[in-house]
Image (spheres, rainbow, N blue to C red):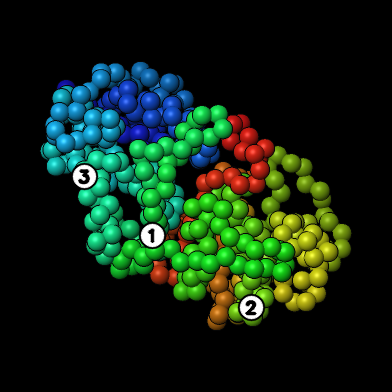
Amino acid sequence: MDKLYLIDTNILLENPEIINTYKSVIISQVIRELEKHKLSNNGDLAYKARRATRYIDENCDKVIFDFKDYKVKFDENADPQYVDNQIIQACLDNGYGLITNDLLLKFKAKGYRIDVIEINQDDTEEYTGIYDLYLTSSKEDQELLAHLYESPEDNIFELVQNQYLFIWDKDKPTYDDFGNINGYEFIDSFRFDGEKLTKLKYKPINSKFMGEKIKPINKKQEMLFDLLQNKDITTKVCLGKYGVGKDFVMISHALDLIEQGKMDKLIWARNNVELADVPTLGILPGDKNEKLIEFAMPLADHVGGIDGLEMLIKQGKIEIQHLGSLRGRDIKYSIIYVTECQNNTREHIKLLIGRVGKGSQLWLNGDLKQTDKEVYRRNSGIKALAALKGNPLFGQATLDKTERSDTARLADLL
């Protein structure tokens, strides 16, 4: 008889097709977690939960469902309400193996001699630049938290250099206006500098171009401020869905550096790809700037419209370039700024990195869900960037909370 493997929630969220590879068991606690995540305000998480639930429903003949209520008894000090402990108990009671990418659960399961299969994370999800750690009030979790503070050099989660660690209190969920769980209370955050965990360092910025004081409006934005203000990281990437503040925060920082004289200019180098399923406008009239300015409207939105953008272009503080015009250039003391980078290939990204000269940096942002052509899905520049994780010159932040407006959040429901 083939061995049965209990599939953890994190695997189903990233790779529900796993049930075709192993003789799979899904317990009720995992189903409940998926249902909870479907209502999350985190659009990526809600999407993945809906996708996983739909896939399981369509392939239910390939899954064994175990709906027993498991009483945690393998450790008298273990929290009986903690799903990970219920998973351990289910494996022990039935001889199930376990498939998970959760480090804490993996270590605990191996401690009880449970057969654990790890799925290569690179095969199931893109690099986010973040490790989210959810802790409870249990004794073992509190000991772990204390250890992180007492021994920040002990890289127990195998973080790569410039990866962020966010710690959340799983006993204290937060709720949206409709009473749905949309996250957990924040405990702390760190960046791994290659040797130890360090506290995030950032400051608000004042920008005359933006006309206001700019500061983070949620915890994940604090991470982006920390990344953008780190002068030692020269290739900076921000990913996230619409409305999370990618362009707003990044453009305000770029203009602040120009105002301070730390950078000469911002070079806007968006790949000018028409929106999927929208007819092209044809060949646009005018000179190069007039042709390209239509694709620089996200920049114009943050500098006072087209008039403000044209003023900065005339002052030499902003330069708008077609991606193909960058080949062969050696760009010094500038920010090469690439938005919508999901519409770039691996070769485009290599070209852009190769343009970074003395004193320059490459800043990119995008959202894989908004990729507009199949070529960029097959040959993804964003996915290629994951090869740089751990390099001291590379950093990435992924934002997940729409801040644009309450109305913009409705898009998550479609």
Indicate the position of residue 212 as horizontal and vertical percent values.
69, 63
Indicate the position of residue 186 as horizontal and vertical percent values.
42, 48
- Identify the mark at residue 260; answer none if there is no mark: 2
Q: Mark 1 and mark 2: span between their CA atoms?
A: 28 Å
Callout 3 crowding tier (Cα within 10 Å): few <14, some 14–19, many ≥20: some
Residue 260 visible here? yes
**Are circles 3 and 1 on residues that touch, CB within 8 Å?**
no
Callout 1 crowding tier (Cα within 10 Å): few <14, some 14–19, many ≥20: many
Residue type highlighted by circle 3: Glu
Residue type highlighted by circle 2: Gln
- Mark found first going from the N terminus, 1 or 2: 1
136 and 196: which is toward the camera: 136
Q: Is residue 133 above or below residue 77?
A: below
Residue that carries the numbered disc 3 in the rendered image: 140
Q: Is residue 68 above or below residue 248?
A: above
Instruction: Name the residue furthest right.
Output: 285
Residue that carries the numbered disc 1 in the rendered image: 190
Residue type highlighted by circle 1: Phe
